[in-house]
Amino acid sequence: MSPERVAFVVEEYGTIRVLWETFRHARIQEQTAIMAKAAERVAPVGNSSQTRPPETKVVKAELLLANLGKGRRRIGNELSSKIYDLFIKDEYDG
């Protein structure tokens, strides 16, 4: 990872601990949203004429860093996913 990209992450999150906690929180939110959506498909609320509340957009945890940076120095989806894997997985498979 280039020094510029590291600087973007440090500027946004400050410490490794904060970044790790942010990844964990985002992962929990993502899993909760997936379970809620699955439960909704199995047992829809009310009758079909009722309007459903608008869906909340949950960012995929692994793409949390993707938009940090500017232009060509942006972190991007692939690098964000690799960083996420390093922080979350028990074993990194590269």
Image (spheres, rainbow, N blue to C red):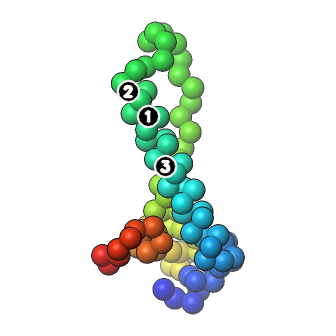
Which numbered marker is on residue 30? 3
Depth check: 63 or 16 in front? 16
Amino acid, disc 2: Arg
Within 10 Å of the Cα at label 2, are there few (<14), some (14-19), or many (20+) other Cα atoms? Answer: few
Give the spatial CA distance, label 1 vs label 2. 6 Å
Give the spatial CA distance, label 3 vs label 2. 17 Å
Res 87 visible: yes
Residue 17 lies, in percent from the top left, at 62, 73
Q: Residue at x 53, y 80 (%)?
A: 73
Residue 82, quarter of the rendered image: bottom left
Q: Are marks 1 and 2 in contact (CB under 8 Å)?
A: yes
The earlier-in-sequence mark between 3 and 2 is 3
Within 10 Å of the Cα at label 1, are there few (<14), some (14-19), or many (20+) other Cα atoms? Answer: few
61 lies left or right of 11: left
Res 76 visible: no
Quarter of the figure with the C terminus? bottom left
> Which residue is farthest bottom?
3
Residue 81 lies, in percent from the top left, at 42, 68
Amino acid, disc 1: Lys
Amino acid, disc 3: Glu
Q: Secondary structure at mark 3?
A: helix
Above or below, 58 against 18 in this view is above
Residue 86 lies, in percent from the top left, at 43, 75
Q: Residue at x 41, y 29 (%)?
A: 39
Residue behind mark 2: 41
Q: Secondary structure at mark 1?
A: helix
Above or below, 17 against 28 in this view is below
Which numbered marker is on residue 2? none
Residue behind mark 1: 37
Depth check: 71 or 15 in front? 15
